[in-house]
């Protein structure tokens, strides 16, 4: 979305120290910080990229948040999968328009939101109702209420099975502690040629997933995504001293189907 800011939209304020503040614009709203406040009326009706000053003279640049911005700054109940893994997950699982996804462990909705943005239709199982409600709220907040038409979340335990009436599925994507327990259920609802992907924090979990992906699965692999920025200032070029290294392992495989 581009153009003029309007009430009801989101805006991202960047200060002189590159700190980022996500706000929901309202006609009578105010953004408050230790540097005073900025009235939302200074932003509403103005184009993206404007500069505004707080009551104490602090300057902010105002832009629209990207999906990456929203995932990092959005309200959450559970730990989210971060952007460095969200993109690779959607590439490895070949997420695209119309793809039918079973997701278990929706958490705060970061992965759901990303797959919906790619055009997927998602059936999600989540144990905690507060997490499910937060995920749906976050999806609607960033993608709009219409995205919920492709997002069907149930308060259910994926370890106990996947309802056949909710399938069949093209993809099964899991962010739960013991994803190997769901693999036998996935084999009953996943189309031949479909893709399974599990996000796990530890390599021992990934190893158990790989052990379970035997017999009816091909092209199994486990990867880890490392994110290192670079400092570039004139002729001074070097890797950043800090990097986003381990967050989780991505284990993926393709289903051959149940044919003998």
Image (cartoon, helix red, strand yellow):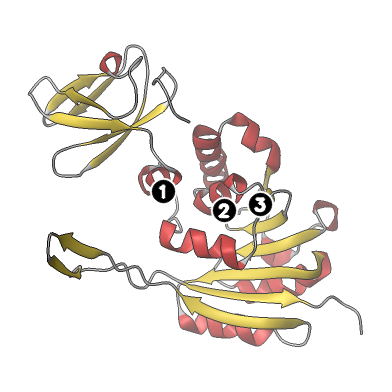
Name the mark on residue 124.
3
Displayed quadrant of residue 73: top left
| Foreground label between 1 and 3 | 1
The image shows residue 60 at horizontal and vertical percentages of: 19, 31
Residue farthest toward the front in the current orientation of the protein: 235
As drawn, 56 above or below 99: above
Q: Secondary structure at mark 3?
A: strand
Q: Residue at x 26, y 16 (%)?
A: 42
Residue 109 percent location from the top left of the image = 53, 48
Could you tell me which secondary element the residue under label 1 belongs to? helix
**Looking at this rendering, what residue extends furthest in the left direction?**
56
Which label is found at residue 106? Answer: 2
Label 3 with label 2: CB-CB less than 8 Å: yes
Q: Residue at x 38, y 33 (%)?
A: 64
Distance between mark 1 and mark 3 Cα atoms: 22 Å
Q: Earlier in the sequence, mark 1 or mark 2?
A: 1
The CA span between labels 1 and 2 is 17 Å
Q: Quadrant of residue 193?
A: bottom right
Q: Would residue 31 be found to the left or right of residue 144 on screen?
A: left
Q: Residue at x 66, y 53 (%)?
A: 96
Name the residue tied to disc 1: 68
- Asked which secondary structure carries label 2, the reply is loop
């Amino acid at each position: 979305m581009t153009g003029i800011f309007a009430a009801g939209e989101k805006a991202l304020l960047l200060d002189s120290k590159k700190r980022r503040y996500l706000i929901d614009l309202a006609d009578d709203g105010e953004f408050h910080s230790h540097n005073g406040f900025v009235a939302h009326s200074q932003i509403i009706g103005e184009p993206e990229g404007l500069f505004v000053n707080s009551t104490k003279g602090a300057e902010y640049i105002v832009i629209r948040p990207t999906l990456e911005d929203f995932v990092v700054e959005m309200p959450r109940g559970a730990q989210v999968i971060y952007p460095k893994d969200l993109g690779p997950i959607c590439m490895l699982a070949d997420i695209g328009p119309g793809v039918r996804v079973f997701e278990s462990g929706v958490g705060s909705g970061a992965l759901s939101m990303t797959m919906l943005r790619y055009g997927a239709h998602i059936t999600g199982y989540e144990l905690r109702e507060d997490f499910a409600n937060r995920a749906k709220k976050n999806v609607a907040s960033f993608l709009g209420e219409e995205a919920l038409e492709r997002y069907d979340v149930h308060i259910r335990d994926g370890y106990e099975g996947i309802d056949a009436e909710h399938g069949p599925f093209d993809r099964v994507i899991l962010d739960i502690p013991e994803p190997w327990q769901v693999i036998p259920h996935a084999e009953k609802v996943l189309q031949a040629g479909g893709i399974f992907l599990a996000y796990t924090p530890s390599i021992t979990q990934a190893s158990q997933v790989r052990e379970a992906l035997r017999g009816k699965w091909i092209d199994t692999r486990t990867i880890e995504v490392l994110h290192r920025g670079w400092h570039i200032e004139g002729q001074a070029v070097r890797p950043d001293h800090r990097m986003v290294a381990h967050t989780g392992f991505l284990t993926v495989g393709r289903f051959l189907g149940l044919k003998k």
